[in-house]
Amino acid sequence: MPRPDTTRSLLLVALLVAEVGLALARVRTDRSAPFSGRFSWSMFGGPITGRCHHSLTATDALGHPIAVPLPRDNPALRALLLADVPTRFAAVVPWFAPYADDDAEVARSLDDVLGRYHRAGAPTLSLTSQLRCDSPGTRPFSRTTRWTAR
């Protein structure tokens, strides 16, 4: 049976090898910076450095602006819909795009969640989602997506 010190040392080495392996797997030579601004150095946590600002607006069938309906039974979706400043948005990104490597991937995942929300929770409204990102090592990214009322 290995001694406890040896076991701890082996686990630490395995953790370091896994961390370095994860980093090497995510290197992209086609970028100005080899790692995405969304890369977290620790697979077990650590800050995602991507910075995004998201706004979501709703209009009724006549085109009048109204408040975005917030679900009472889904706190995660509610937090996402209220994520109108970068710090709030950064807090919810791991829920819908935990392994996103670039801002466009975050946008695709966000559009998927908001599209499902529109179909299930607000089909009679038109929604407009604006996402602007300025992540380190990448060009600024922006996109606007609209879902129209049925």
Image (tube, rainbow, N blue to C red):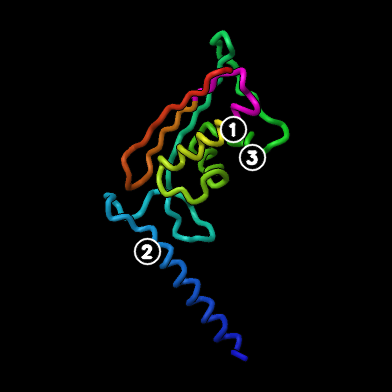
Q: In which quarter of the image is residue 135?
A: top left
Q: What residue type is labelled 3?
A: Ala
Q: What residue type is labelled 1?
A: Arg
**Where 115 sits versus 1, above or below?**
above
| Residue at the outermost bottom position | 1
Q: Residue at x 61, y 22 (%)?
A: 123
Tell whether position 124 is magenta.
Answer: yes
Q: Residues within 10 Å of mark 2 (few under 14, many from 20)?
A: few
**Where 135 sits versus 146, above or below?**
below
In the rendered image, residue 19, in percent from the top left (x then y), is placed at 45, 66
Q: What residue type is labelled 2?
A: Leu
Q: Residue at x 54, y 60 (%)?
A: 44
Q: What element carries label 2?
A: helix
Of callouts 1 and 3, which one flags the residue occurring earlier in the amino acid sequence?
Answer: 3
Residue extent of the magenta highlight: 116-128
Q: Is mark 1 on a helix, strand or loop?
A: helix
**Where 16 sits versus 55, above or below?**
below
The residue that disc 1 covers is 116
Asked if marks 3 and 2 touch (Cβ < 8 Å), the reply is no
**Where 18 sits versus 138, above or below?**
below
The residue that disc 2 covers is 24
| Residue at the outermost front position | 150
Q: Residues within 10 Å of mark 1 (few under 14, many from 20)?
A: few
Q: In which quarter of the image is residue 50?
A: top left
In the rendered image, residue 33, in percent from the top left (x then y), is placed at 30, 52
| Residue at the outermost right position | 73
The residue that disc 3 covers is 76
